[in-house]
Image (cartoon, rainbow, N blue to C red):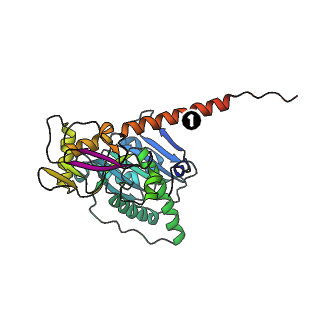
Amino acid sequence: MSDMSNVSQARGRSIRMFLVDGSPTGLIVAEIVNWTGKIIVVPRSALASFLKRREAQNTGVYILSGQDPNDPFRSQVYVGESEFVGQRLRQHDSDEQKDFFERAFVLISKDENLTKSHARHLEEQLERRIRASGRATVMQTNKPGGSALPEADVSDMEFFLDQIEVVLPVLGLDILRPIPSAAASDEKVLVSQRSTGAQFVFEIGSVKAYGMEIDGEFVVKAGSLARDVETPTLPKAYRALREKLKADGSLKPTSNQMLTFAQDVPFDSPSAAAAAVYGASISGPANWKADGTGRTYADLRREELADAEAASKTKDEAGSGSSLPIS
């Protein structure tokens, strides 16, 4: 069985972000060192500034992003491509069907070797990956046709897409990363988890739910039992979240005022997961317990941080040791 040492073997990457006008809400240019691509974040209010830039005349792919008007917990996106990407964004700005978008993410090549065929291929593959991830609602009027590319070009575009998957979440658009599933193999779960791969249990009365922390999200496993009762202490946002889960079939009624999770469901935190399971405002770290040990998520978290701090001190002490001169 794999262990957490695999996590430390992941390679780091340097992402450069340039705030064009010095503001985090203005144009942002993002690049990965040694990658020929470039992503420009264009807030709708800064579209005029982007149109003045040379990149607006490039061939590129773009993603329009905004809140899904029918689901406050999801983004709505539109994927497109153009030989003159700035001109196309200007057209979308006056299109009533594209009123939803708040930001555009423009993907171009720094060496200007991105052709129309490359852009069409990227458009098709981006939409496919976004739909597969399940993290956003895709608004698409015409299905991208893609483009037949030579084998070497397809390989280059796959690498291009892989870099986009890394950069977009850093820029606040997490729509390509697959939703984590506790049903994944032990190998995958252990490598991606921040803790020790423990399975957690939430059990109060008839409620019994199982969860795991995967890729920074707390995933409640399919088959978990939740209450179909909500107390006045449940915050409005969690109330809306439970309604959403019922509406999309993730939470299904069983009997005796109980619900069952029909599929794995990720949450932003253990407390969000606990609130969704119990229908009340309740501490997740104090009530999710490692299966078979009774130790809470909070206990494990404290131990993890204490171990990390101790390791850091040991490293500092080893580095500060003085060496005697050789006589």
The residues colored magenta run 194-213
Residue 316 position in % (x across, y down): 62, 30
Q: Secondary structure at mark 1?
A: helix
Residue 208 in magenta stretch: yes
Q: Nearer the viewer, residue 39 or 33?
A: 33
Side of 316 where 193 appears, left or right: left
Whether residue 303 appears in this view of the structure is yes
Q: Position of residue 303 (x, y in %)?
A: 45, 36
When asked about the image quadrant of residue 319, the answer is top right
Amino acid type assigned to the residue bearing label 1 in the image: Ala
Q: Is residue 202 magenta?
A: yes
Q: Is residue 307 above or below residue 157?
A: above
Q: Which residue matches tag 1?
A: 311
Q: Residue at x 46, y 64 (%)?
A: 118
User: Dot 1, crowdedness within 10 Å: few (<14), some or many (≥20)?
Assistant: few
Q: Quadrant of the C terminus?
A: top right
Instruction: Where is residue 104? Give x, y as percent.
Output: 36, 48
Magenta stretch, main secondary structure, is: strand
